[in-house]
């Protein structure tokens, strides 16, 4: 087993980040994996790009899905969760988290936290 990273671009406030963390923890807890670290990034290492540059479309998604509603403290960030697990387990966890982020499937709906799997 080796350390692997789950990365999700999010347009979230602290409450939204907490919700996504809970989804990840639940997905990890049901498998033979272990969380060994986590970070919320605003920039990309070795690059001049910020998460606002890369995930700006998530802010646009929020504006379209919530017209006239303030985005509050939401900002584009990247949640990085470091796991010790096999590649197969990493894939299963990633798939589970993605399904939990968007439980309504492909039908038009509003995301609780606009997101993008990185």
Image (cartoon, rainbow, N blue to C red):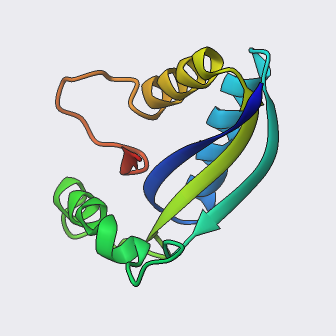
90 with respect to 31 (left or right): left
Report x, y in % for residue 103.
Answer: 40, 24
87 or 19, nearer to the observer? 87
| Quarter of the rendering occupied by the N terminus | top right
Q: Residue at x 46, y 34 (%)?
A: 101
Of 82 and 99, which appears nearest the observer? Answer: 82
Total of numbered circles in the picture?
0
Q: Nearer the viewer, residue 44 or 14?
A: 44
> At which x and y percent is residue 99?
44, 24
Q: Is residue 22 above or below residue 14?
A: above
Q: Is residue 72 visible?
A: yes
Nearest the camera: 109 or 36?
Answer: 36
Measured as percent of width and height from the top left, residue 17 is found at 60, 55
Q: Is residue 69 visible?
A: no
Residue at image location 68% in from the left, 61% down from the top: 39
Expressed as whole percent of the image width and height from the top left, the position of residue 24 reads: 65, 35
**Residue 4's image quarter?**
top right
Is 36 rendered above or below residue 49?
above
Residue 48 falls left or right of residue 39? left
Residue furthest out toward the bottom: 48
The structure residue drawn at horizontal position 61% and vertical position 25%, both measured from the top left corner, is 90
Q: Is residue 31 left or right of residue 117?
A: right
């Amino acid at each position: 087993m080796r350390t692997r990273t789950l990365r999700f671009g999010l347009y979230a406030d602290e409450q939204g980040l907490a919700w996504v963390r809970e989804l990840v923890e639940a997905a990890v807890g049901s498998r033979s994996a272990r969380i060994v670290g986590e970070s919320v990034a605003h920039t990309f290492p070795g690059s001049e790009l910020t998460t606002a540059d890369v995930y700006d479309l998530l802010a646009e998604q929020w504006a379209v899905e919530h017209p006239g509603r303030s985005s509050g403290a939401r900002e584009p960030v990247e949640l990085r969760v470091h796991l010790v697990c096999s590649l197969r387990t990493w894939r299963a966890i990633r798939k589970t988290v993605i399904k939990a982020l968007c439980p309504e499937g492909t039908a038009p709906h509003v995301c609780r936290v606009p997101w993008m799997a990185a």
